[in-house]
Image: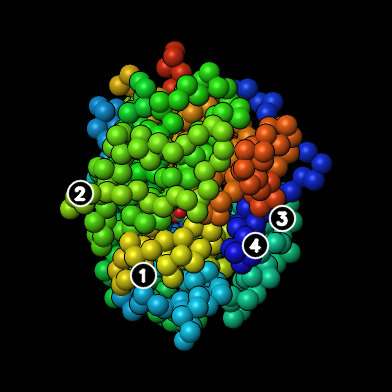
Amino acid sequence: MKHFTSLFLIVFLIISCKKPESSLVDKTQKRGLITQKAMVVSARVEASKIGSDILKKGGNAFDAMVATELALAVSFPYAGNIGGGGFMVYRKNNGEIGGIDYREKAPLAATKDMYLDADGNVIPEKSTLGAMAVGVPGTVAGVFAVHEKLGSLPIETIIKPVIDLARKGVVVTKKQERRIKHFQPYFRKANKDSILLEQAWKENDTIKYNALANTLERILQNGRDEFYKGKTAKKLAAFIQENGGIITEEDLAKYEAKWRTPITFNYDDLKVISMSPPSSGGICLAQIMKMVEPFPLHEYGHNSLKSIQVITEAERRAYADRSFYLGDPDFVNIPSITLIDASYLNERMDDFSFEKATKSSDVSHGTIQIIESNETTHYSIIDQFGNAIAATTTINAGFGSKLYCSELGFFLNNEMDDFSSKPGVPNMFGVTGGEANSIAPQKRMLSSMTPTIVEKNGALFITLGTPGGSTIITSVLQTILNVHEFDMTMQEAVNAPRFHHQWLPDEIRMEPRAFDADLINQLKKLGYIINEKDAPVIGKVDGIMVLEDKTLEGGADRRGDDTAVGF
Ligand code: DON
């Protein structure tokens, strides 16, 4: 328990810097950037600008997605990547929807017990630090698949500005300076040689990413196969193996991104479109929203006692189902239809009472009779044609496995930790899993990433998402509810203080100094355990809302350096 709590703390400490005297939550900013036609919101101004410039050149949201994703790999190595993976959900201007899964996969040599010692105990750090933690990266395959199917500009026009940015360099922000410093001991532990980010980088320094620029140049010349079958693949596989990992050239050659049908559901007059497995995001979000829908949250009020109770209890039940039922749909049968069925979810809330907290030990996964066969970063884009994308990408922890390939210029993920190494033993985010999310060769590890698009009365309304591990789903949930139930602007919805419950551990995590002391006492009296220590901030939501006059409002989360750019 202690192990995952401290890891959880580390992940969140580096999402932002700690301000001891006041809350990190900005409650003052009312409206975000307003633009007439198009917008990109991401974790770094450089990436938002590169994406927005692509739109200005006449590119569509999918061209801008490729540019923004790769620009984040350069400007935000903490989570942006070509050594990781992600998910993207889209809605075209004609209403057509879709999603792509470019999630990492377990290598061919992976085994169910690969992180256990001879006594069957989880070996600390084996799934989080260094080469054994790395899953086969999917980002390059993902962006090329998107470009091939949906893009409109030549790939050179899209990638060239990213290469230029890597060569010109990226200015270090205050938050980044603290993050780099915080992680340097881990870089030392994971790497044989000193790496670029081990230098004493200070705010306003410029870091040039020449090795990454060279890799991107080769990818531009030779296409996605450069990363999976070319010189880069050979170097990458050799590098991982030299560092004790098991990824081979065959693993890279076999990798494919997959188009997936998003999860869709209605909530009042909204239609929510979110990511399907192997992300748990869409199903969990649907479960929570359908469980809270019968309650008049608007009357209870934002972050009121009753709202927090209802949302917490729905979250508790949804995460219990997540732990049991969800995994890679190519390996396990997921009863998706039943899991998001309103009558099943109403039954799940049958034992809820406003008088007393439910205990997680009294909650298990729901019973389903018919089994049908069947540190991350988010960016949102709406283009001048009315197409929208929501994309969340990650190398899992901040700087992933901390293993950095100096020759190729990027960090490798530690996504293998998102598998359940042992049933019931929590991972880095404190979430437990079972058979459905056990390790197998070529399997994708379960994710919480929840890139989401919302329609209102049939028209595009919001595109949003966030990092934050297991808190991603509940941050997306609260942001949608803030707009829909509590009439907030996009920026207010993003700024508002957040809380989180994930079944186990049985506690409500709350952003510190952001909630009223009386409210917390009332929750405690009802039997809720409150944890205000382990999550200095919860999520970093980036979203765009279409306003009634059809202009766009960006919500860029100031918990990070996130910025909206558009025209
Ligand atoms: O896929 C997932 O759910 C995690 N690997 C996401 C990691 C994350 O959000 C880290 N950021 N705080």
Mark 1: give few (<14), some (14-19) or many (20+) Cα within 10 Å: many
Mark 3 or mark 2, which has the lower sequence index?
Answer: 3
Q: Position of residue 155 (x, y in %)?
A: 34, 49
Kind of residue sitting beneath label 4 = Ser
Q: Mark 2 and 4 residues: CB-CB less than 8 Å, in contact?
A: no
How far apart marks 2 and 4 lie (CA) works out to 40 Å
In the image, the residue with mark 4 has its CB under 8 Å from the nearest atom of ligand 1: no
| Residue 6: mark | 4
| Residue 202: mark | none
Which residue is found at the position 78% from the left and 38% from the top?
22
Q: Secondary structure at mark 3?
A: helix
Q: Secondary structure at mark 4?
A: helix
Kind of residue sitting beneath label 3 = Arg
Which residue is found at the position 47% from the left and 51% from the top?
362
Mark 4 or mark 3, which has the lower sequence index?
Answer: 4
How far apart marks 4 and 3 lie (CA) works out to 18 Å
| Residue 178: mark | 3
Mark 2, mark 4: which one is toward the viewer?
A: 2
Return the residue at label 2.
370
